Image (cartoon, rainbow, N blue to C red):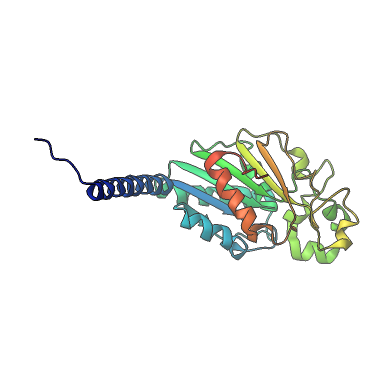
Amino acid sequence: MPQILKPGMFLFFLISLTLSAESTASQSNQTSAKQECVILLHGLGRTKLAMRPVQKALAQEGYQVWNESYPSTQKTIEQLANTTITKALQYCRSLGSKRIHFVSHSLGGILLRYYLQNQHPRELGHIVMLSPPNQGSEVVDYLKDNKLFQYFLGPAGQQIGTDQSSIPSKLKPIQAVIGIITGSNSFEPWFSNRIPGPDDGKVSTESAKLAEMRDYLVVENGHTFIMSDAYVIEQIQHFLKHGKFLRTP
């Protein structure tokens, strides 16, 4: 005769089956994440420390993460883009990554757009840009002739104005899944007075946009610390997985 499970044994069987399924799914997700790498590109005058909160959160999700400082104030955008991103891609490929995502802040987004003008990595995944001066920055227009600005922010800082000779003005659309997060809260009124419309203290919400972007989000944060915001990091994680930001009521 077939054995009949008692109610208590049946409940134990269901719990064991559920836990086994959850464990298998978790192991599968971890394996998948380990095959994905995320390259972090900090902004002008910053270091890898600025992107450390993003790095920590993504590593906990199981991603391999490249986060290194690059000499943003010492070289041109052309030089920085080619050397920095080539090095980062080599790192991810050395790990056997099947997909390579990018998360950039400010100038980092311009470096990536410049690099992707003539390159298209076969493993390219999703891109999240934080406060990118995609149409240039009026702050640079105002300060570019200032000797202190030139000294501290270097040649790349001179290249991200709004005039037709600037790098952002010359860049063409790129084929990629791009999400843009920018801020509308400025702690720098001396700069905001020179920026039309809502801004984050360095970049207007409108100038952060790209025609080819897949999704766009404005948060109540400033340019300097947007990458440390827990809500922003949550949105980064969601976009890397789903190619869109998390919409809440």
Image: 239 above or below 233: above
At x 62% / y 46%, what residue is drawn?
128
Residue 184: give x, y in percent of width and height.
Answer: 79, 53
Q: Is residue 116 left or right of residue 150?
A: left
Image: 38 above or below 74: above
At x 12% / y 36%, what residue is drawn?
2
Residue 245: give x, y in percent of width and height.
Answer: 62, 43
Q: Report the quarter where the C terminus lies.
A: top right
Residue 69 appears anywhere in the view: no
81 vs 133, nearest the viewer: 133
70 vs 29, nearest the viewer: 29
- Which residue occupies the extreme right position in the image? 193
215 vs 124, nearest the viewer: 215
Residue 171 appears anywhere in the view: yes
Residue 150 quadrant = bottom right
Residue 27: give x, y in percent of width and height.
Answer: 35, 48
Q: Is residue 169 left or right of residue 90?
A: right
Residue 190: give x, y in percent of width and height.
Answer: 88, 62
At x 75% / y 38%, what residue is drawn?
170
Residue 211 quadrant = top right
| Circle count | 0
Q: Is residue 131 left or right of residue 31?
A: right
Residue 55 quadrant = bottom right
Q: Is residue 33 left or right of residue 57?
A: left
72 vs 63, nearest the viewer: 63
Q: Report the quarter where the N terminus lies.
A: top left
